Amino acid sequence: MRVNQLASVIGVTADTVRYYTRIGFLKPTKNPCNGYKEYSPKDRRLLRFILSARQLGFSVNDIGDILHTAEQGASPCPLVRRFIQQRLEENERSFRDSAQLRQRMLNAVETWSQKPDKTPTGDMICHLIEEFDDAALS
């Protein structure tokens, strides 16, 4: 199956297939008659694996390490568990940061709705931001 066919079957763009081929995750053979890259059922399974891993938050480097470990004949499961724990911790930090930002924004909306508009001066662009005090908005 060629690039566009694999992309269509999996539901991704041809560029996605080409990207994972370019970085060496997919290893198609070349058709000797026309020089087209031909993807095997193994490539199809591998691409599904890669996309599933990406949906779980694994980085391209993580996936490369997982694939390399598997190619060496070792179980990648301990590595996968460690990576998912790291990604979960990163996600939790990001979630907390986003929740804090959301609260600051909500407080700003409420506080700023009661302040007048001001015309910019040589010393000021927008007093709402320039007078912003995170502590005062909490």
Image (spheres, rainbow, N blue to C red):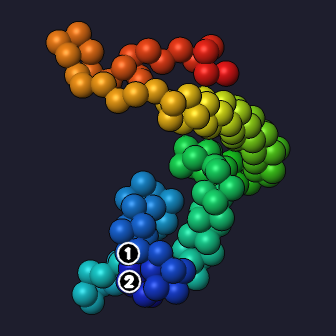
The mark that comes first in sequence, 2 or 1, is: 2
Residue 100, above or below 136: below
- Residue 4: image tag: 2
Q: Quadrant of the N terminus?
A: bottom left
Expressed as whole percent of the image width and height from the top left, the position of residue 46 reads 60, 69
- Which residue extends farthest top? 123
| 12 displayed left or right of 92 | left
Name which residue type carries label 1. Ala
Residue 127: name its quadrant.
top left
Which residue is at the front of the view, 65 or 119? 119
Q: Residue shown at 58%/47% (left/top)? A: 59
Which residue is at the front of the view, 97 or 124? 124
Expressed as whole percent of the image width and height from the top left, the position of residue 9 reads 52, 86
Residue 11, above or below 55: below
In what element is the residue under mark 2?
A: helix
Residue 68, above or below 94: below
- Asked if the residue at tag 1 contacts the one at tag 2, i.e. Cβ–Cβ closer than 8 Å, the answer is yes
Residue 109: name its quadrant.
top right
Which residue is at the front of the view, 11 or 43? 11
Q: Residue shown at 42%/67% (left/top)? A: 16
In what element is the residue under mark 1?
A: helix
Is residue 44 in view from this perspective?
Answer: yes
Q: Pointer 1: residues within 10 angstroms few (<14), some, or many (20+)? A: some
Q: Quadrant of the C terminus?
A: top right
Residue at mark 1: 14
Name which residue type carries label 2. Asn
Residue 59, above or below 133: below
Count of numbered badges drawn on the protein: 2
Expressed as whole percent of the image width and height from the top left, the position of residue 14 reads 38, 75
Is residue 90 in view from this perspective?
Answer: no
Expressed as whole percent of the image width and height from the top left, the position of residue 27 reads 46, 67
Q: Residue shown at 41%/22% (left/top)? A: 129
